[in-house]
Image (cartoon, rainbow, N blue to C red):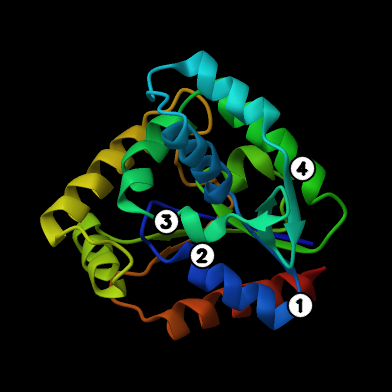
């Protein structure tokens, strides 16, 4: 079974998806971490984000493995290095390159074939897993998302910087030629602006259980 969750940056997809995966004993996939890996190596190699051919080469040569739902590169858990303001600033243009997205999608399908999965990202419900049994779209205003990011303490940037970054990310994500952020026709839309994590999680759990009953 695949539960696919889409939505803009900072809406809480990862936290909610982790909770859902834990509830059902499913595997968890954060697709954004694959693009963050590419951004991470681009920064390490000082490759500018407008060098599409170099980014594509990184994506196609990306040798990642999974251990306990974490991404490993050469036997090292790479995920602790992926959530910095520097990566936040460049991951959107990196993920906007169609050939990069194609390479990442191939890798995702290879690593997660034949497993029960809760996945989250920008185009999980529309491109990567269009036949997912359950589709969810989480949303919230840019201001709410920036405030949440600030209070999470995961960025050293101030509120205005975080807000501007989120607005720029939204503009890029909704304007991509391939894999753009949009609401799938058969997705359950949830505005989380006035909801806490428990309420959002409960809504999704009820939706999944209802879906299972119908089948």
Query: Which residue is denoted by mark 3 in the rendering?
Result: 83
Q: Quadrant of residue 116?
A: bottom right
Query: Above or below — where is 171 with respect to 209?
Result: above
| Mark 1 crowdedness (10 Å alpha carbons): few <14, some 14-19, many ≥20 | few
| Residue at disc 1, secondary structure | loop
Circles 1 and 2: CB atoms closer than 8 Å: no
Marks 3 and 1, how far apart in space?
25 Å
Query: Which residue is denoted by mark 2 in the rendering?
Result: 14
Which label lies toward us, 3 or 4? Answer: 3
Q: Earlier in the sequence, mark 3 or mark 1?
A: 1
| Residue at disc 2, secondary structure | helix
Q: Earlier in the sequence, mark 1 or mark 4?
A: 1
Marks 1 and 2, how far apart in space?
16 Å
Query: Which residue is denoted by mark 1 in the rendering?
Result: 25
Residue 98: horizontal and vertical position, in percent? 54, 22
Circles 2 and 4: CB atoms closer than 8 Å: no
Q: Nearer the viewer, residue 116 or 200?
A: 116
Badge number at residue 185: none
Marks 2 and 4, how far apart in space?
19 Å
Quarter the C terminus occupies: bottom right
- Position of residue 65 in the picture relative to residue 142 (left or right): right
Q: Residue at x 58, y 54 (%)?
A: 78
Circles 1 and 4: CB atoms closer than 8 Å: no
| Mark 3 crowdedness (10 Å alpha carbons): few <14, some 14-19, many ≥20 | some
Query: Which residue is denoted by mark 4 in the rendering?
Result: 109
| Residue at disc 4, secondary structure | helix
Circles 3 and 1: CB atoms closer than 8 Å: no
């Amino acid at each position: 079974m695949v539960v696919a969750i889409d939505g803009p940056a900072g809406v809480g997809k990862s936290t909610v998806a982790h909770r859902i995966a834990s509830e059902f004993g499913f595997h968890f996939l954060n697709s954004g971490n694959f693009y963050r890996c590419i951004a991470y190596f681009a920064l390490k190699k000082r490759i500018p984000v407008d060098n599409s051919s170099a980014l594509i080469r990184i994506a196609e040569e990306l040798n990642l493995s999974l251990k306990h739902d974490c991404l490993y590169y050469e036997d090292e858990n790479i995920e602790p290095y992926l959530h910095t303001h520097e990566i936040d600033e460049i991951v959107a243009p990196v993920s906007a390159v169609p050939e990069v997205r194609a390479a990442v999608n191939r890798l995702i399908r290879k690593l997660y074939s034949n497993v029960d999965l809760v996945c989250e990202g920008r185009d999980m419900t529309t491109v990567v897993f269009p036949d997912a049994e359950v589709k969810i779209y989480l949303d919230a205003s840019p201001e709410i998302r920036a405030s949440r990011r600030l209070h999470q303490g995961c960025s050293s940037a101030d509120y205005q910087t975080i807000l501007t970054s989120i607005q720029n990310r939204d503009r890029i994500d909704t304007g991509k030629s391939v894999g753009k952020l949009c609401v799938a026709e058969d997705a359950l839309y949830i505005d989380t602006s006035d909801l806490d994590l428990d309420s959002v999680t409960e809504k999704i759990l009820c939706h999944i259980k209802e879906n299972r009953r119908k089948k």
